[in-house]
Image (cartoon, grey):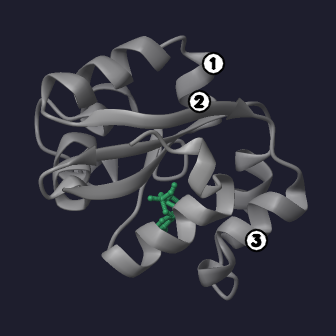
Amino acid sequence: MEQTLSIIKPDGVKKNIIGEVIRRFEANGLTVKAMRMLHMSKEEAQGFYAVHKERPFYDSLTDFMCSSPVVVMVLQGENAISLNRTIMGATNFKEADEGTIRRDYATSVESNIVHGSDAPETAAWEIAYFFSALDIMA
Ligand code: CMP
């Protein structure tokens, strides 16, 4: 069993599709093992996306991520990291497969509804950014 970090971004929360996003994860074999809603500060968003700090979209992305509340979750399942990325669809919604969350709901590369970890090392780091071991259900 593998774990991954999922974020329902400000656009997903504003669209009132928290339940629909989680339904898709659960219907496709992922289980929620930890979850909370929070409104990140600019510094917290910058820390989370520090890997992108040299990218031209970093400032806009971190502004967006602290613009309103998000839902952060630990998802667990067989191959959870790649399975979550399949359910989400490509970062650019225009390239996302039919039936994926981003294809159905994203409105730009930035406002793409969800974030998911891209590798085991980043999943471990991202989970620890938001949750302590005691927050994650066995
Ligand atoms: P996410 O999976 O959260 O990882 C980084 C985020 O940066 C990405 O989704 C997008 O929301 C955002 N982003 C904005 N512009 C770009 C871009 N040109 N290329 C990749 N990611 C971008």
SS assignment at label 3: helix
Q: Hey, what amino acid is under mark 3? A: Gly
Q: CA distance from mark 3 to mark 2?
A: 20 Å
Query: Which residue is the site of mark 3?
Result: 47
Q: Work out which quarter of the rendered image holds the N terminus and state it.
A: bottom left
What is the crowding at mark 2: few (fewer than 14 residues within 10 Å), some, or many (at least 20)? many
Query: Which residue is the site of mark 1?
Result: 14
Query: Which residue is the site of mark 2?
Result: 11
Q: Residue at x 26, y 31 (%)?
A: 25
Q: CA distance from mark 1 to mark 3?
A: 23 Å
Q: For this rendering, which residue is in front, 63 or 25?
A: 25
Q: Residue at x 40, y 63 (%)?
A: 117
Tag in front: 3 or 2? 3
- Mark number, residue 105: none
| Residue 132 on image: x %, y % | 65, 55
| Sequence order check, earlier mark of 1 and 3 | 1
What is the crowding at mark 1: few (fewer than 14 residues within 10 Å), some, or many (at least 20)? some
Q: Quadrant of residue 10?
A: top right
| Residue 13 on image: x %, y % | 59, 22
Q: Residue at x 88, y 64 (%)?
A: 43
| Residue 112 on image: x %, y % | 45, 43
Q: Are marks 1 and 2 in contact (CB under 8 Å)?
A: yes
